[in-house]
Image (cartoon, helix red, strand yellow):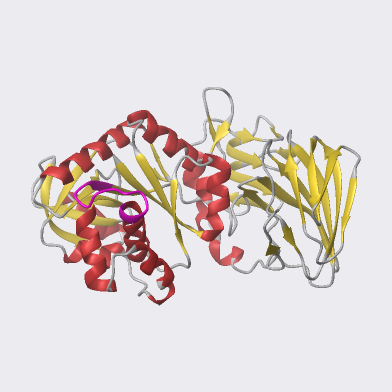
Amino acid sequence: MNIILLSGGSGKRLWPLSNDIRSKQFIKIFKTENGQYESMVQRVYRQIMKTDPNATVTIATSRTQVSSIHNQLGEKAGISVEPCRRDTFPAIALATAYLHDVQGVPEEETVVVCPVDPYVEEDYFAAIKQLGERASRTDANLVLMGIEPTYPSEKYGYIIPESSSQVSRVSTFKEKPDMETAGSYIRQGALWNGGVFAYRLRYVLDKARGLMGSADYEDLFNRYDTLDKISFDYAVVEKEPRIEVMRFAGQWKDLGTWNTLTEAMEETSIGKAMMDETCANVHVINELDVPVLAMGLQDVVISASPEGILVSDKARSSYIKPFVDKIHQHIMFADKSWGSFRVLDVEEGSMTIKVTLNPGHSMNYHSHKNRDEVWHVISGKGRAVVDGLNQEIEAGHVLTMKAGCRHTVIAETELKLIEVQLGKDISVHDKEKHVLG
């Protein structure tokens, strides 16, 4: 089974736990059998591999999310990186070309495309497998998954099938409606369009050749910023006459707001949190190392991270985006392929960061043009390379790097350090990578 997971999102609706680097699919809120927490992307990947251990999983994503994916999945999944945002048709075409040209998947094989962030159970992935199998033997060019609606929703587009059969030709598509219109669609037997579909690779490669002038991965990647911004639905799905829909009646939730996300939480709190007995339907997610106390609250979500603190009525939490759009600050935390960092303090001319490197991992060998850095090792053991010179480091060691100095650190055990950046122009863009000889 070949699967393309679409991983996008700007990180606005689940602020302050999400930001431009860590979107909702990377937030660890789902408790596993061993008591640890996993994110949506980890949960979905685990469920896919349980259904089909031989599945080929490719994640189509932006550059900003690559480090988070490596942090949470390691090198398990293939990654098709979008050089910039161009909507879903270019993203899917690029990922399909990646499967064919880089992964060597033949044109006649099928692939299933689905979002990375639905809250589903294992029957969903069994249905995805059936969807791919159906696409391999039908004369239809596209096979969609239609979600049996549980209520009239304004959030989804609708698919109206020709019949009530398990698999049916598609009669028509409907845009996201108002509540009353959604109810009328459901009475006609309409299904939610969850953005899940299957096709043979050749089909989308042909569409890319026709609409983009090429289906070559390297060519599409190099001129990606010139491709038209258009969704897969508009460019392909709604124009395709040979199209089927397969019904899915299992659990399927889009956890796009705090209200829906807390519905999927098994616990009322994560992190340091206390509630008195008068609280009802209150959820707290606290990533700060300070306690949160809630008293006398009902239907409220409280979320705290280095990005900020949210206290909101659950029903109002879906209207958060315009307010978050007004917040302009440094990225205060991020997961990286080598570990993570969290900003502790920002002042004019300085920034203080806590850095955690995972065992066996290292930063890129790099330098900065406009800032000095001082590293204070607070725990663990490792090795630093400063302008080509190796040095064993452990708790209590201090390293000083002037602007232009090439440096990296390699962790033997989990390694934690406090990094103080000093300079007039501190920026994430002030970084030049070098080859470690």
Q: Can residue 236 be seen in the rendering of this structure?
A: no
Dominant SS of magenta comes to loop
Task: Tell me residue 372's x, y (percent).
Answer: 85, 63
Q: Quadrant of residue 133?
A: top left
Magenta part of the chain:
100-111
Which residue is pictured at 50% across the width and 42% down the height? 75
Question: Considering depth in this image, is 393 or 262 the residue closer to the camera?
Answer: 393
Task: Tell me residue 249's x, y (percent).
Answer: 25, 37
Q: Relative to residue 189, is residue 312 drawn left or right? A: right
Position of 7 relative to 382 (above/below): below
Position of 13 relative to 85 (above/below): above
Q: Can residue 17 be seen in the rendering of this structure?
A: yes
Q: Relative to residue 115, is residue 33 drawn left or right? A: right
Which residue is pictured at 59% across the width and 67% down the height? 325
Question: Considering depth in this image, is 227 or 174 the residue closer to the camera?
Answer: 227
**Is 109 colored magenta in this rendering?**
yes
Tag count: 0
Question: Considering depth in this image, is 229 or 78 the residue closer to the camera?
Answer: 78
**Is 240 colored magenta in this rendering?**
no
Which residue is pictured at 73% across the width and 50% down the height? 342
Q: Relative to residue 53, is residue 345 drawn left or right? A: right
Question: Considering depth in this image, is 90 or 304 the residue closer to the camera?
Answer: 90
Q: Quadrant of the N terminus?
A: top left
Task: Tell me residue 61's x, y (percent).
Answer: 46, 56
Task: Tell me residue 32's x, y (percent).
Answer: 52, 27
Position of 138 relative to 184 (above/below): above
